């Protein structure tokens, strides 16, 4: 039962840190640049990881990937991207990933979405949240669905079906293989394709 309370606490702590820090910064400085937002988010994750380690609920399971595995994960990422094209262009045409409203997609944006976002999100979702659910011996289907749902909700206000799909696929693979690296790479490759798409969008407009 103590593990359940720790899991609930850490699941609330991260979004609370991010939201409160953004609100406080905005109240003081009135305007937040993307670089500041990224720094706040990364800092919030770092503090959450520290607390999780102190609470002993963060466990790293990873394996060294082979080229064959990376190729397979790339295909999975492209499949998810294909589904996202359908959702965004057909079901939700007004939605735009990243900073499409900016005149250019900065290098800092690319680095953040390509490296930090998949690394931080997957470490938190899999090595803390999902690992805790596994230790609680909850039904596997419930674990995968809860992890995927939390992943989708965490993208509020830009919640999409594609976030749930990404969460379901990576959660299933993590439960099956106990390898956070594959989840990070699938997420990173997917974001990389979106970055290319974003740059193409900006160039063509």
Image (cartoon, rainbow, N blue to C red):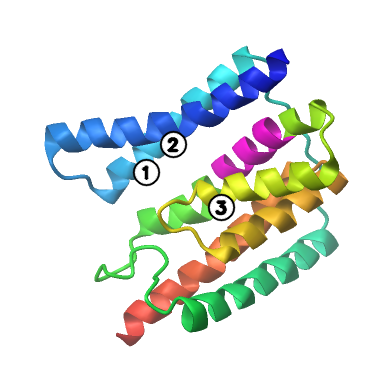
- Residue 76 position, x and y percent, is 73, 67
Q: Quick check: 53 above or below 67? A: above
Q: Quick check: 145 above or below 128? A: below
In contact (CB < 8 Å): disc 2 and disc 3? no
Residue hosting label 1: 38
Residue hosting label 2: 42
Residue hosting label 3: 152
Magenta run includes residue 201: no
Magenta run includes residue 122: yes
Magenta part of the protein: which range?
119-130
Q: Is residue 16 visible?
A: yes
- Principal secondary structure, stretch drawn in magenta: helix
Secondary structure category for the residue under label 1: helix
Secondary structure category for the residue under label 3: helix
Q: Is residue 45 visible?
A: no
In contact (CB < 8 Å): disc 1 and disc 2? yes
- Cα distance between the residues tagged 3 and 1: 19 Å
């Amino acid at each position: 039962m103590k593990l359940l309370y720790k899991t609930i606490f850490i699941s609330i702590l991260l979004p609370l840190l991010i939201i409160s820090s953004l609100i406080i910064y905005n109240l003081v400085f009135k305007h937040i640049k993307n670089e500041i937002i990224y720094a706040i988010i990364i800092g919030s994750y770092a503090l959450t990881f520290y607390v999780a380690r102190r609470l002993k609920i963060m466990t790293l399971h990873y394996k060294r990937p082979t080229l064959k595995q990376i190729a397979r994960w790339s295909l999975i990422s492209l499949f998810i991207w294909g589904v996202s094209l359908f959702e965004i262009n057909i079901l939700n045409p007004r939605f735009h990933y990243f900073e499409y409203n900016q005149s250019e997609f900065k290098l800092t944006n690319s680095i953040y979405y390509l490296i930090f976002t998949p690394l931080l999100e997957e470490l938190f979702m899999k090595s803390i949240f999902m690992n805790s659910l596994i230790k609680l011996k909850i039904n596997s289907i419930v674990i995968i669905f809860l992890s995927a749902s939390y992943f989708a909700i965490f993208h509020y206000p830009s919640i999409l079906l594609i976030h749930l799909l990404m969460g379901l696929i990576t959660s299933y693979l993590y439960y099956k293989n106990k390898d956070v690296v594959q989840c990070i790479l699938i997420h990173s490759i997917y974001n990389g394709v979106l970055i290319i798409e974003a740059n193409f969008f900006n160039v063509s407009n």
